[in-house]
């Protein structure tokens, strides 16, 4: 077992989930709201959580892409249940929803006013409920992230950023990911890898974050195929969880064009697209777009990946069963036009190493179709 103190407290290791009651006691949480999803509850996790934490209140209506309306429903359950803390249990959606609830335990709604592009960073303070994040996938790294990405009632998918919403404690137990379906392992794993890629390429000067991103990329790149092929491969599952963790640890450098596009794509309510799948599909075209701006970083990536990063990423996508392009997911030309415009307003737009125009975003989308 290992305790890691970087940005927040992390308890990492097989069996750490079973110590959840002990950790809640340390944090002074006696009646937590559990933010999770219907799928996890349907396979028995609700019963397991209730046995472990008998006083818990469960909110299991987290959508695949968390929404402001779902956050408000969970906030109501938090206050009506007399809760004194929050647990995000599940993938990045459940953890991001939990962060949204956390904000509104000490701030007035609406949630959208706290989005980064609305000047929300200065509005968020630390007088909010404590939160524990327990990831059951190895992808978003939201358990150590200072952001929550939410589909707002206005129809826009926006990031709420603040160091105050970083979970008080992250419990990373690789055993919770054993047996994860192949498709979900692939999509969440490529999410983690894309975070390592984009944070490394981001132009901000942050050598520790850059080093962490490269370590996560090297681990994830070697482990993802093994994790997809064999859900019980303990080393591969551990390494993918580290990749997700390290990708998010490096978020301080910023993300880039992949996420500028996947955020508005994820806001298309008719399609409800998986964020990690979108990141994987867009990565080759964004890598090509960035090549002229990242200099020797291209060669660093090529050494880790064993060839030109754009080609290697496309081959990896095919090998692990990522859909061949956006059209296969139902994205049409009209949607692409709208997404290209919305990407210019995304909080990740300004931290890409090469600032894209609307037409260049549209070109990336067309290349990824």
Image: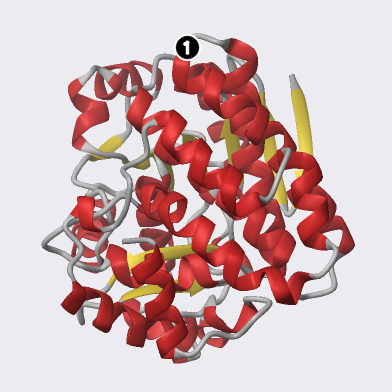
166 and 30: which is toward the camera: 166
Seen as rendered, the residue at the extreme left is: 270
Residue 187, position as x, y percentages in the image: 41, 39
Q: Label 1 neighbourhood size at 10 Å, few (<14), some (14-19), many (20+)?
A: some
When the figure is inspected, residue 100 is found, relative to residue 225, above or below; the finding is below
Q: Nearer the viewer, residue 249 or 341?
A: 341
Determine whether, in the image, residue 44 is placed left or right of residue 344: left
Residue 165 coordinates in the image, percent (x, y): 54, 63
Image point 58% across, 48% down: which residue? 311
Q: Is residue 70 visible?
A: yes
In front of the other: 7 or 250 = 250
For residue 248, above or below residue 235: below
Number of marks in picture: 1
In the current view of this chain or complex, which residue is farthest to the right?
A: 207
* Image quadrant in which the N terminus is located: top right
Q: Is residue 241 above or below residue 288?
A: above
What x and y, as percent, mark residue 234? 59, 11
The residue depicted at 21 percent of the width and 82 percent of the height is: 154
Q: Secondary structure at mark 1?
A: loop
Query: Is residue 299 toward the left or the right of residue 101 in the image?
Result: right
Q: For the point 50% across and 63% down, which residue is it?
A: 285
Residue 269, image x, y percentages: 15, 64
Q: Can the viewer see residue 84 in this picture?
A: no
Name the residue tied to disc 1.
Answer: 230
């Amino acid at each position: 077992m290992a305790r890691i103190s970087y940005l927040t407290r992390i308890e990492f290791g097989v069996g750490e989930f079973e110590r959840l009651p002990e950790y809640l006691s340390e944090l002074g949480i006696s009646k937590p709201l559990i933010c999770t999803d219907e799928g996890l509850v349907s396979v028995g996790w609700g019963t397991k959580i209730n046995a472990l934490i008998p006083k818990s209140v469960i909110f299991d209506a987290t959508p695949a892409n968390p929404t402001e309306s779902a956050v408000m429903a969970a906030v109501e359950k938090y206050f009506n249940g007399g809760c004194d803390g929050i647990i995000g249990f599940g993938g990045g959606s459940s953890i991001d929803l939990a962060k949204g609830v956390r904000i509104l335990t000490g701030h007035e709604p609406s949630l959208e006013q706290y989005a980064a592009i609305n000047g929300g960073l200065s509005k968020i303070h630390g007088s909010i409920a404590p939160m524990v994040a327990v990831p059951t996938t190895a992808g978003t790294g939201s358990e150590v992230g200072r952001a929550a990405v939410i589909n707002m009632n206005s129809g826009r998918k926006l990031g709420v950023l603040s160091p105050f919403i970083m979970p008080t404690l992250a419990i990373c137990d690789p055993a919770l990911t054993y047996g994860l379906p192949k498709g979900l392992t692939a999509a969440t794993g490529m999410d983690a890898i894309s975070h390592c890629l984009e944070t490394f390429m981001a132009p901000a000067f942050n050598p520790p974050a850059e080093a962490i991103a490269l370590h996560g990329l090297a681990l994830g790149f070697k482990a993802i195929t093994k994790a997809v092929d064999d859900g019980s491969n303990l080393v591969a599952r551990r390494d993918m969880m580290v990749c997700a963790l390290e990708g998010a640890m490096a978020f301080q450098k910023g993300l880039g064009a992949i996420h500028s596009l996947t955020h508005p794509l994820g806001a298309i309510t008719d399609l409800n697209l998986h964020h990690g799948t979108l990141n994987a599909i867009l990565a080759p075209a964004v890598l090509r777009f960035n090549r002229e701006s990242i200099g020797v970083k291209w060669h660093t990536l090529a050494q880790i990946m064993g060839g030109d990063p754009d080609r290697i990423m496309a081959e990896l996508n095919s090998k692990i069963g990522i859909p061949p392009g956006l059209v296969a997911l139902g994205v049409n030309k009209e949607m692409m036009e709208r997404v290209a415009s919305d990407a210019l307003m995304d909080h990740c737009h300004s931290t890409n190493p090469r600032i894209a125009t609307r037409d260049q975003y549209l070109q990336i989308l067309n290349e990824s179709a």
